[in-house]
Amino acid sequence: MFLQENICAPVRMIPGRPGARCPPRLRAPQGKPARRHGRRIELIRGRNYHPAMNSTAPMATTAKPHFQGQADDDARLAITQQALESRLTQAPHDTAALIELAEVLFRRGRIRASSRPLLQAASRLPRNAPLIVSLTQRLVASGEIVAARACLDLLEQAPEPPAELLATQAHLRFTIGDIAKARELMERALRAGADSPGELHMCALLQQFSGRIDQAQELLERCLMRWPRFGDAVTVLVNLRRQRPESHRLDWIEEQLRQLPREPADTDREFVRAEFEYARFKTLDDLGRHEEAWNALSRCNATMHALNPYDAEAEEAVTSALTGLPTLPARAPSAGRPSGPVPIFIVGMPRSGTTLLDRILSCHSQVASAGEIIDFWRQLHWVADVVPARSSGLLQIVRRSDRIDYRELGERYLRQTQWRAQGKAYYLDKLPANIQMVAFIRRALPHAPILHLVRDPMDTCFSNYKAMFGNISPYSYDLEALAHYHGQYARLARHWHTALPGSMLDVPYDGLVQDTEATVRRVLAHCGLAVEEVCFKPERNTAPVATPSSAQVRESIHTRGLGQWRNYARQLEPLRLALEAQ
């Protein structure tokens, strides 16, 4: 459910490809965008965007004995580990060997142990940019964000960095949520000569997240002029603004689709077709041509559903495991309350209004937004010593739940995230998927408020169905899957209220947009915050926001999102009946 990708697996380097910043399957040369695969390094709800990887980073070259068959893999890894540890007794500061040892330990399922060589390497960094990049990637993936930031700070001291290094730094800054710094670095990379569709797209995204819509549009149009079938760019472009009769590119989109014949065996091409069908839908929907729009959305989502099948059985297994968690003795919020900034968690279904609430609260003088970070997930896996592996990783954590050191979990989470408060007393961890983490958060961080966005099921589900999340949200591309997924979410939310009464405050989306002042006052009181009038005007919030709603939430609060599904009531009747049956 929600977040089943490998959220902290080490990034594998691809040696022997000079100049490549991404593994071949993720690159997009000559206008052919690469298909984004399901494995996720960092969350962007709008796109499954993968950070750039420096494939030229030197690695340890310890000889690895060859074994036939997967059954021998652990034996091979054990021998490799022994060889690396022997090598490190002779050269304890061999950064490449430390990095490789960390990956070997991780692959052997020892996530806690894998951090030690990474931190040892970070304590004595070489003046070697590719090695620092490789180390930083793995530190981020392992949840060692503080050490990763120190590595990035050192990288910034590189004299006259080439465009490739600047772009890689921008991606790494982006993965830890430092949007402003990432944008600055990507702008420098373009000035230094970075000139690929992926780099233009990334810079445009960062401009969009920063509220610089005109700059984002110029970059995307420049990109599409040279690479007209780069689907990533067209999906962002149509979302920057509402498409209008006097200013849209529907004819151009349809011409690109005519030149992209259906080829079901070619998954890359099919993904691009889905992106252009999405752009067609968004344009037609904005123009009020709903029948045509639905046909385009149906084609887009049918393709995406075929590429990303929904696993209802796995979703249900996770929900059943979480609702079957033994009731853990609660720690009093005041008992041993840690010092420093306090996290506020915002949870719920994706597209339920979590970004709007984040923007409202981060207007407050004592609150900063950390954005959609996955730090709690990473630290939970680290403390439980469970390698993330889709549903099975979380199921294993549930089985170990009575052996987890929750105080250590809370302390580790705070140590790796409190810098995000930027000197303020509170910071927002706005990851909808943390609805699964409520019991763990309550035990590890009893003083942290949890706010649960509640939105009309039809509005929420339709907003998901028309969102085009890329390859990371398979539930969203099929009405039956969407109803099932929402049912699992609702089942879990009800369980938390029953098993852990008072664990989270329900915040109705309708109240947020129709009775803003009263709703926000209640939320502020729950969090222990004084009322500040600026919170009622979130459109004045200039901070970056890296979600699909980044354009909408810069507007004044409005009610246009209420009942939007009714434009497609006939087509959505099966969804309505399925939700009603729940």
Image: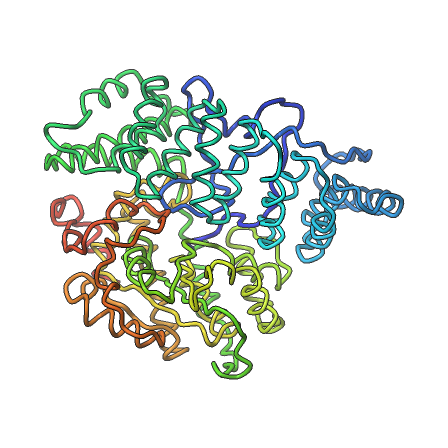
Q: How is the image coloured?
A: rainbow
Residue 35 occupies quadrant? top left
Q: Which of these two is toward me, 278 or 516?
A: 516
Q: Position of residue 66 (x, y in %)?
A: 79, 33
Q: Position of residue 282 (x, y in %)?
A: 21, 36
Residue 340, compared with residue 196, is above or below; it is below
Q: Which of these two is toward me, 169 or 265?
A: 169
Residue drawn at x 88%, y 48% as measured from the top left: 89
Instruction: State left or right for residue 204 relative to residue 258.
Output: right
Farthest right residue in view: 90
Residue 323 occupies quadrant? bottom left
The number of numbered badges drawn on the structure is: 0
Residue 4, compared with residue 361, is above or below; it is above
Residue 417, compared with residue 310, is above or below; it is below
Instruction: State left or right for residue 497 relative to residue 239.
Output: right
Quadrant holding the C terminus = bottom left
Q: Which of these two is toward me, 321 or 334?
A: 334
Q: Position of residue 412 (x, y in %)?
A: 59, 65
Quadrant holding the N terminus = bottom left
Q: Position of residue 358 (x, y in %)?
A: 33, 59
Residue drawn at x 58%, y 30% as measured from the top left: 161
Q: Which of these two is toward me, 291 or 194?
A: 194
Residue drawn at x 53%, y 74% as measured from the top left: 339
